[in-house]
Image (cartoon, rainbow, N blue to C red):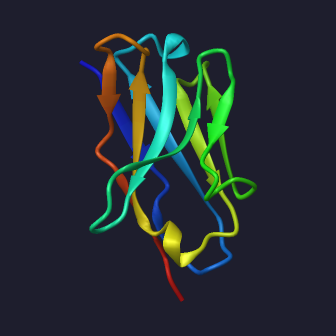
Amino acid sequence: QVQLVESGGGLVQPGGSLRLSCAASGIVFRIYAMGWYRQAPGKQRELVASIRSGGDTNVADSVKGRFTISRDNAKNTVYLQMNSLKPEDTAVYYCNAKIPTTRNDFWGQGTQVTVSS
């Protein structure tokens, strides 16, 4: 059974930082591309950052320079370090694990991030 469990969300003031974690089980983690997506109320889910099995990363322009994605294959965990948070970063953040061009595509339950003073 595949499980992706996100943690680290919460309420933070503008300019603050949070680190999200996503612990995976039931998959061969090291061969999966991992991603963080977010969905704000009334908006579509969007890709925030992704990291390939080989370590190449991609970060959305809206968070470039503020967010960093990383992975620890020994711990089956992917991280999203979020700095200089803005109110517009408020959303539910979801972890995704997939092998491109296959049906291996899994989602976590999401974790709420709220940026507000």
- The residue at 58%/81% (across/down) is 13
**What is the quadrant of residue 25 in the picture?**
top left
Find residue 10 and report its horizontal and vertical position in percent: 46, 67
For the image, the number of numbered tags is 0
Q: Is residue 21 above or below residue 12?
A: above
**What is the quadrant of residue 75 in the picture?**
top right
Find residue 50 and report its horizontal and vertical position in percent: 56, 34
46 and 27: which one is in front?
46
Farthest-out residue, left: 1
Farthest-out residue, right: 65
Farthest-out residue, bottom: 117
Q: Is residue 110 above or below residue 101?
A: below
Find residue 37 and report its horizontal and vertical position in percent: 44, 46
- The residue at 65%/66% (across/down) is 17
Q: Quadrant of the C terminus?
A: bottom right
**What is the quadrant of residue 69 in the picture?**
top right
- The residue at 34%/50% (across/down) is 110
Find residue 74 and report its horizontal and vertical position in percent: 61, 19
Q: Quadrant of the N terminus?
A: top left
Q: Is residue 108 left or right of residue 77?
A: left
94 and 76: which one is in front?
94
Q: Is residue 30 left or right of residue 37?
A: right
- The residue at 48%/42% (across/down) is 36
